[in-house]
Image (spheres, helix red, strand yellow):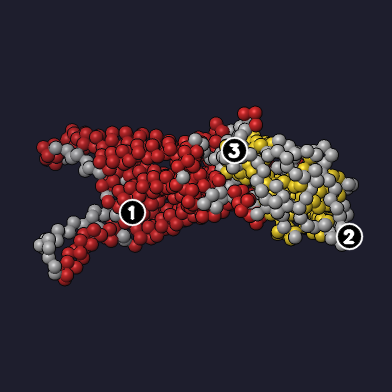
Amino acid sequence: MEKASHRRIAGLLGALGALLALMFADAGPAAAHATLESTDPHQNSVVATAPQAVTLTFSESVSLSGDSVRVLDPAGKAVDTGNPGHADGRADTARVGLNSGLANGTYTVAWRAVSEDSHPVGGAFTFSIGAPSDTSVSTTALQGAKADSVVAALYGTGRTVAYAAFALLAGVAAFVLICWPAGTARRPVQRLLMSGWVALLVSTVAVLMLRGPYERGSGIGQAFDLSLVRATLDERIGTALAARLLLLAASGVFLSLLVGQLGQPAAQPSAAASETSEADAGEDEDAELRELEQRAAERPQREARLGLGVAGLVLAVALAATWVGADHASVGIQVWLALPFGILHLIAMALWLGGLAALLVALREGVGAEVVDRFSKIAFGAVAVLTATGVYQSWRGLGSWGALTGTEYGRLLLVKTGCVVAMVGVAWISRSWLARLRSAPVEAAEVEPAELPEPVAVAAHSEDPVRQAQLARQQAAREHAGRDRGLTPTRAGLRRSVLVEAVVAVAVLVVTTMLTNSPPGRVASEVKAGGAAPAAGAPAAGGPAAPQTEPGRTLELKLPYDTKGRTPNAKGTATVTLNPARTGPNEVHLELDGADGQPVEVPEVQLAFTLPDRDLGPLPVPLTPEGTGRWSGTAQLPLAGNWVVSVQIRSSDIDQTTPTQSLKIG
């Protein structure tokens, strides 16, 4: 039996591994987190006359606020008319008008919008009128391109608490319905259910209030701005949060019914029938009568559990949909499949993680091995569902093997996978403790709480501190009676193992929240390669003005690269030179040399500059080929600071890398 079980598990893992490989081998494009596709005027372009408006086109629909697009002149003064809207009614665009009479020089466009999957995205680029010029844009002017650190931390904490509260609420309710109906009469279980409900309510309200400042990059003081709350409710995520609050009201009614129905002792067969059964226990007819009486006595509770189970399942699916319907699963490829898989993933997570919390309490209360064994089977099924849905979500979000290590999303996914593997390992240890518990009949039986006599009452207004302390000790003994008796060495070992699982589960929830806030690997690869990329628009007619180079002002950067491929161009050195290496236009040359020092040709290469301190960029550099492994272009670096140059190099259809290096301008 043990070998057969191992073969089935190995076969399941092998099938999932083959499915994962096939998925990644033929991954197509997906959308999630909007990316900037084109701009008018084009990025880094020089136009002869001042445009009347600035238009941005994205890869998917975006939501805009009153300051989503701001245009700043070389002195840092806003020159846009405000209140951007969608160009020609197209939801994937943003357009803002410009003031008349703009002078020549370099202008900076800072933008921030909310993508269709409810995540804020932002960036900046420059264009010039007449001729490029130096520009000085203050940090304050660009701070809207990123969320306030305090707001972002509180918003992320609220989302993490919401995930944990949902797992606690749904998981504990499922545990008592399926594994331990009598547990609803225990105060610790009731406290777990109420804690989950209250935490989910508070975290949902907090996320709703923090969403507005989080989107707009404003401070914590704006959390109580009712106009921002009203604007959030008009968005998809606001609708989902409002629906969650309504579902929580229904969940409160469900919890009262759950405790009220299952918390009552089951009806017992009539005394007469019991006496008859005892007198004629040896006869088959009386044995059958006793069984029928027992079934009749248990029927009301079975029907209550069935009804509550159906109602609880509907509520759990609806609550899970408030996350899935406003996240990565709601946009991109195969939405029709991603949505139900996302719901299944959340519910399976709740069954496993919330059930662990309930199991900790149940072991403390002295439940029998039968309850633990029942949960073990449910947890195994939940892990199987988590694995299958997780593989699909990983394929959909990553798109390539390289994204596992080349993007933040992929690295977080690796961390989450490691945590889940650790949980499975600890769960395997828990199964060994469960096997020991089954093998000891005395320990496997459920431990009934010890009944201690009520303490002798004293006058309500007694001022004797010694007597009051004695009564307090008696009350504490009553509250903990039976629990300590239930913690035999085997039960204690099992409880420690489950506790470790629960601790790792908290880490899984934190990483899950970070994953949902990170752009999927497919999109992150595009952004890392240069944000709006060359498709964001070639230079306008006439192109950018040639920068004025200066002898002795050339800065040379060498970036070793290795795409891990097997072609001769897979490994070498990228050399980037800038002149005059200061703010404004810079002449850029890019050289790719192989490991032997000879120029190499590659299918694709992209160059971009980013200023992290100002949250500016990436600013792509349009490159012009000048022979094998040689390119040139013009980089507009509008601000002084510590810039980062990135060179995305693709040596084959599947092998690519993006080396980076810092440089100081100004």
10 Å crowding of disc 1: few (<14), some (14-19), many (20+): some
Compared with 589, 99 (above or below) is above
x then y, percent, for residue 288: 21, 34
Circle 2: residue type: Pro
Residue linked to disc 3? 83
Q: Which numbered marker is on residue 551? A: 2
- The mark nearer the N terminus, 3 or 1, is 3
Counting residues from the start of the chain, the first of labels 3 and 2 encountered is: 3
Q: Residues within 10 Å of mark 3 (few under 14, many from 20)?
A: some
Q: Label 2 to label 1, Cα distance in Å?
A: 75 Å
Residue at image point 47% right, 56% down: 504
Disc nearest the viewer among 3 and 2: 3
Q: Residue 604: x, y in percent? A: 79, 44
Q: Mark 2 vs mark 1: give the one in front.
A: 2
Q: Secondary structure at mark 3?
A: loop
Number of residues whose C-alpha sits closer than 10 Å to that of mark 2, classed few (under 14), some (14–19) or many (20 or more):
few
Which mark sits nearer the N-terminus, 2 or 1? 1
> In the displayed structure, does residue 402 sit left or right of residue 330?
right
Q: Which residue is mark 1?
A: 361
In the displayed structure image, the side of residue 149 where residue 267 appears, left or right: left
Residue type of the residue flagged with mark 1: Val
Q: The disc labelled 3 sits on which kind of residue? A: Asn
Q: CA distance from mark 3 to mark 2?
A: 46 Å
Location of the C terminus by quadrant is: bottom right
Element assignment for label 1: helix
Q: Is residue 131 above or below residue 596?
A: above
Q: Position of residue 28 (x, y in %)?
A: 67, 37
Q: Residue 319 vs residue 472: left or right?
A: right
Marks 3, 1: nearer the viewer: 3
In the picture, measured across the screen, residue 454 lies left or right of residue 31, that is left
Residue 363 appears in the rendering? yes
Residue visible at 71% across and 35% down in the picture: 52
